[in-house]
Amino acid sequence: MTASRTTPSLFMSVIPLLVLFALLGYNVAVYGDDSLSGANQSALIIAAALAAALGLYRGEPWSEIQDKIIDNIKAATPAVLILLMVGALTGSWLISGIVPAMIYYGLQIFSPTFFIASACLITAIAAVVIGSSWSTSATLGVALMSIGYAMGLNPGLVAGAIVSGAYFGDKMSPLSDTTNLASGVSGVDLFTHIRYLSLTALPSIAVTLLIYFVLGLFMGNDAVNADNTQQYQNLIDEKFWVSPLLLLVPVGVIFLIVKKVAALPALFMGALVGVVCAILFQQSVLAELAESTGGLYQSVMQALYGSTAIVSGDPVLDELLSTGGMAGMLNTIWLILSAMVFGGAMEAGGFLARITRALISRVRSDAGLVTATGATCVVTNVSASDQYLSIVVPGRMFTEAYRKQELAPQNLSRTLEDTGTVTSVLVPWNTCGAYHASVLGVATLAYAPWAFFCLLSPAMTLIFAWARIRIARVSAEPADAAVIKPSS
């Protein structure tokens, strides 16, 4: 016998989350880094099944639960396609010599002491221009990770710096979809939103760069020395035809994205040009691969869809000169799909809405409202596994609350970005966390402690709220007649 379709209790709503956290924690203890090979996906499906069962118990029709799950999976389709194309791109750029050339010239340009701060700054600038943290990681991020590996730097630290820079640039770019979404759902002019956001984002990135600079001073001496640098360059030179001309391919992909070409076709064109460069300039590499694959055509296809490795004789460089192609992305895609199933079941059962309502039930102050908004964004990122939902759901929920509290809407839009956008990449089963972990080749929980900008941004917006720093206010009038008053 099923219960009537009423609002679920808070206790019932958090049960699937608690079960998920327990399973994921145990998976880390049992499987370690291998938990993404199926254990975490299974945990998400088990938690989703529990959420669906509770929804059925409450009287939700299975058809509605299934429709919500399907809608979530549809929403994740662009991410799945981009992941597949990134896999093909990395394989293509390996056999074409593009990635080896990036490593070769990167070792000449960068010093290990300043590399971490430089990686953060470069990706920040690129993401502002491109308007996408995902595209930045798929292009510059891949190259910077390879250089960092060759320098002997902590991969988690390098990935954390890349993610920090990419997400700062993404937040501050007028071309970013999340920036436009946050301002749109809050009813704020785009550039008003960006200016107000800069009050917290700029101090956060400044502190982040300072931390990376200090870490570089301590870690630079432990990184690769000049002799090893020359050795890596000599080995790359023996295997590949290396020329600055190869770097025109990633520059061209970035140019296409800047010119508003969608990420998927831009990455496809980059992969295609990589194949052409491999055929024209890297015949010796293709000939070596053909011995194991059976021919030129098979070598190229293998690089696009499967595992490819160039043997240099050095274990560190061998690790860099290998890729999994599109097949290497399948575990991540599996994780995203499983997370979407869980998020859909939670949303269909009304559990996500019930949790978020509980977060705002005791709000009595401006700072409390900002805190509740941030907590809702984080909970949505964890439970719904999608950064867009972490912006849209709290944005819709809190708009009226901010108006009644006489807070200007840019307070809401900034909080959505500072706590929703940036924390999505810290959740392993969120689409953003899974994507960057797969593209950069570093587990989410390995880079998360080093992604200082993503950790500082939520703290910064809470500091501003509780210290009442530059809090824009409006009169308690209809939105079209609202007048901004000086901050208190």
Image (cartoon, rainbow, N blue to C red):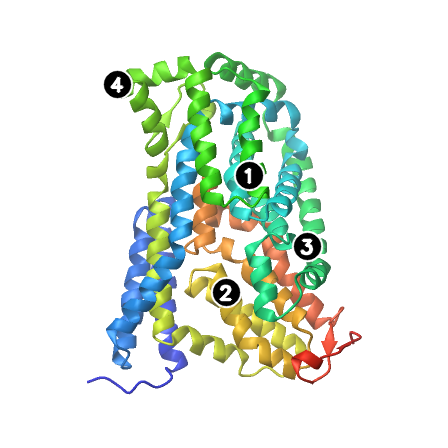
The residue beneath circle 4 is 294
Tell me the number on the disc at residue 1. none
Please tell me which residue is depicted at 65% across the width and 28% down the height of the picture.
110
Percent coordinates x, y for residue 232 in the rendering? 53, 19
Q: Tell me the distance, in whole angstroms, between the alpha carbons under discs 1 and 2.
A: 29 Å
Measured as percent of width and height from the top left, residue 304 is found at 36, 31
Tell me which numbered mark, 2 or 3, is placed earlier along the sequence.
3
- Cβ–Cβ under 8 Å for marks 2 and 4: no
Please, what is the three-letter code of the amino acid marked with disc 4? Answer: Gly
| Relative depth, front residue between 334 and 30 | 334
316 left or right of 227 in image? left
Quickly name the residue at label 3. Answer: 204
- Residue behind mark 1: 256
Residue at 26%, 18% in the rendered image: 294
Q: Report the residue marked by disc 2.
A: 390
The kind of residue tagged 1 is Leu
- Between the residue at mark 1 and the residue at mark 3, the CA separation in whole angstroms equals 30 Å
Residue drawn at x 65%, y 53% as measured from the top left: 172
Judging from the image, what secondary structure is the residue with disc 1 in?
Answer: helix
